[in-house]
Image (cartoon, rainbow, N blue to C red):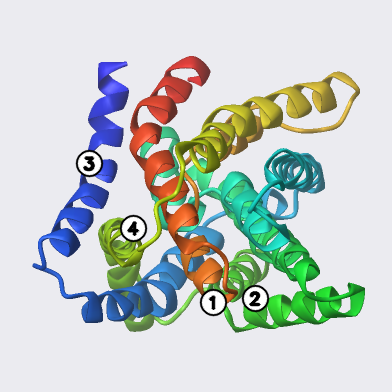
Amino acid sequence: MLSILFITFPFFALVLCGYVAARKGLLPQLAIPGLNTFVLYFALPCMLYRFGAGTPIAQLLDGSLVAVYLVCALLMVAFTVMVTRKGRIAWNDASFGALVAAFPNTGFMGVPLLVALLGAQAAGPAIVTILVDLLVTSSLCIALSRLDSADIHGAEVAAQKALKGVALNPMPWAIVLGALSSGLGVVLWAPVMQTVGLLADAASPVALFTIGAVLARSQMNSTAATPFKEYVPVALIKLVLHPMLVGLVGLGAIAVGVPLQPFALTVIVLVAALPSASNVALLAERFGADNGRIARIILLSTVLAFFSFSAAVALLT
């Protein structure tokens, strides 16, 4: 267990550094969008491209893995909406609460952390989960969030806007380009690949630092108090129920003959044990949800995940 903590500690420590820097004013709030832009449009796509290009195409087209993870994501969204949509929490807040319960921080934290723990072969299954969450889980929850004030056509429009957002997100395109490079055996010109490598190497530390800064900004800009009962259960659903569900569904699939590799199952269970994706706070703000509640869920899941994720790694490896 101690050896695992030695690996996980620096990742969470970088999140803490970003949080403290923003809280203490060492990093101005106006600078945080610039960090986000660098990570989202430059460093992270290069990291995902490099992992995609170095991963056998068969791993990136694993239908069994997609099916298991997608079923679990849909169940997580349905369950979280069902248990939280009451009182002052209507469709908008319940939907984004469901998104933080079902959408792990795989891109910013999960891929580099799992590669450090399990080796480069962990990148393939983790990248597949990113595609599922970006293409399906996010679009579904954004569509559901519009049911408060619109009919089914309004939800369809919201889903179309969500898909447009996915189309403009460089992360899935970087994965697709990496997969094509892997499948076609394409190798970039050496100076270009060195540039990609430099940006890819910067992705992990800057992304983790940015997560902390974004969480601090969301907390500082939140004016309304949120009762514990409205965010603590969702954080626990994310960290406890999600990995348990993925593990049970995956084992059940293997038992009935689905060709899901045990190693791939281990990776996606650990993906599910990650804290909530920090970019959901930005989506919640954009769509008028209670961003303070969402930020508290993300912050609490990130704090608790240092212990719960390390325990999950100890159990599974």
- Between marks 3 and 1 in the image, the one whose residue lies nearer the viewer: 1
Q: Earlier in the sequence, mark 2 or mark 3?
A: 3
Q: State which quarter of the image contains the N terminus.
A: top left
Secondary structure at badge 1 equals helix
Residue 98's x, y, as percent? 65, 49
Circles 2 and 3, Cβ within 8 Å, touching? The answer is no
Disc assigned to residue 286: 1
Residue type at the position of mark 2: Val
Q: Nearer the viewer, residue 195 or 221?
A: 221
Residue type at the position of mark 1: Arg
Q: Earlier in the sequence, mark 1 or mark 4?
A: 4
Secondary structure at badge 4 equals helix
Residue placed under numbered mark 3 in the picture: 10
Mark 1 and mark 4: Cα distance apart in space: 16 Å
Residue 144's x, y, as percent? 77, 63
Mark 3 and mark 1: Cα distance apart in space: 31 Å
Q: Earlier in the sequence, mark 2 or mark 4?
A: 2
Residue placed under numbered mark 2 in the picture: 166
Badge 3 density bin: few <14, some 14–19, many ≥20, Cα 10 Å: some
Residue type at the position of mark 4: Leu
Secondary structure at badge 3 equals helix
Residue type at the position of mark 3: Pro
Badge 4 density bin: few <14, some 14–19, many ≥20, Cα 10 Å: many
In-image side of 269 versus 159 (left or right): left
Mark 2 and mark 4: Cα distance apart in space: 22 Å
Residue 157's x, y, as percent? 81, 82
Q: Is 33 rendered above or below residue 25?
A: below
- Between marks 3 and 4 in the image, the one whose residue lies nearer the viewer: 4
